[in-house]
Amino acid sequence: MRDRLLQLEKAALSEISSIKNKEAVIELKNRYLGRKGELASLTKELGKLSHEERPVVGDLINSIRGRIEERVNSLLTAFAQDEREQRLKAERVDVTLPGRYLPLGNSHPITQIMDEVVSIFLGMGFKVAEGPEVETDYYNFEALNIPKDHPARDMQDTFYISDDVLLRTHTSPVQIRVMQGKKPPLRVIAPGKVYRRDSDITHTPMFHQVEGFMVDESITFGDLKGVLTAFLHSLFREDIAIRFRPSFFPFTEPSVEVDIQCVMCNGKGCRVCKGSGWLEILGAGMIHPMVFKAVDYDSERYTGFAFGLGIERIAMLKYGIDDIRMFFENDVRFLRQF
Ligand code: FA5
């Protein structure tokens, strides 16, 4: 029994010395030291020994198990360390390598102007509202004091989807939607896309407007002038000249169009301002009592002003672009300049 045990130890240790990988160590450990392993089956034979021999051989079995276990464990530790080193080597990052170039995009010039306009009004305490681009005739025209067959409908050539449904021609319907849901005081802007059957160097079938309106007791034309002047000074230059010209919109009375001094020639007269020295920038006015009637506001108690500006028009002026269609051709050579 003693000899068999010593032979087993010798065989195990010699196998261990030539082992090449972790899996083989585990297999060997099970084979020699496992519950059904070789050492266990020899241990079962202890019963056959004499009373005196049993503890001696038992001690020998334990010490052999200890020695094999020690070698096996130190091998497993060595393999684990090896594995870790390999992994660290493979995962090492060379911080001296040149970085990968990621081309950086930027927002579209129209988005940039839109963001700037919205941010100026947010600074004046206005809140942003939105409305649908597919609108009903009622919100786009009727509630804004433009009944069917009214000649003012010709001012905005409309894309109709059906008799009563259309692509909104301006952001003014958002006035109605907001006022239907809320009571004054209101200070709201409504940026968004609008659509008209228009196409030339200053008109596109889709363009962007920002509507704005303020309603409360005792809002006056002076408030309209003050807010729009502060806005235009902030958007262009503090010292730019501004003029208010009488105009007509069915949903405002009185109505104005606002011009700024031509930013290209500083008012001297050039091709962009067609020699006049002025550029039209927005439409505005005091909200018409008929509009208040449509949303059930008491026009004896409340007054308000509203305005609507074209974002593309402003972008053309700020960047000196003379064909509006450039914004929608998506030529990257053009877009990269902003
Ligand atoms: C309106 O759309 C009114 N709803 C504005 C308004 C609101 C007046 C509230 C009073 C009170 P108008 O049709 O003028 O007005 O358009 C406003 C601006 O949109 C114009 O000054 C112009 O800058 C721009 N615009 C109009 N048509 C086009 C187009 N086809 N392409 C690009 N911009 C356009």
Image (cartoon, grey):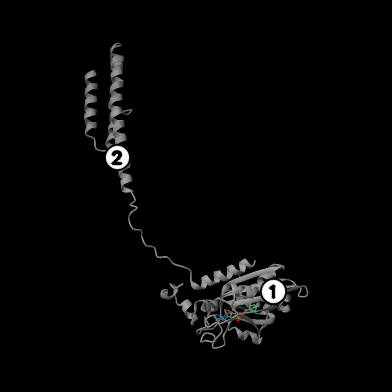
CA distance separating discs 1 and 2: 79 Å
Residue lying at 33% horizontally and 54% vertically, measured from the top left: 96
Residue 312, position in %: x, y? 53, 77
Q: List the single residue furthest toward the bottom.
A: 275
Label 2 SS = helix
Residue 250, position in %: x, y? 67, 82
Residue lying at 30% horizontally and 28% vertically, measured from the top left: 70
Residue lying at 68% horizontally and 80% vertically, measured from the top left: 252
Taking 112 as reference, is 14 above or below it? above
Q: Can residue 81 be seen in this view?
A: yes
Q: Earlier in the sequence, mark 1 or mark 2?
A: 2
Question: Which quadrant of the structure image shows residue 42?
Answer: top left
Taking 88 as reference, is 182 above or below it? below
Residue 263, position in %: x, y? 54, 80
Residue carrying label 1: 223
Residue type at mark 2: give it.
Answer: Asp
**Disc marking residue 77:** none
Residue 120, position in %: x, y? 59, 69
- 235 lies left or right of 219: left
Q: Can residue 29 be seen in this view?
A: no
Q: List the single residue furthest toward the right.
A: 300
Residue type at mark 1: give it.
Answer: Asp
CB of mark 1 within 8 Å of CB of mark 2? Answer: no
Residue lying at 31% horizontally and 31% vertically, measured from the top left: 73
Query: In which quadrant of the rendered image does the N terminus lie?
Result: top left
Residue carrying label 2: 82
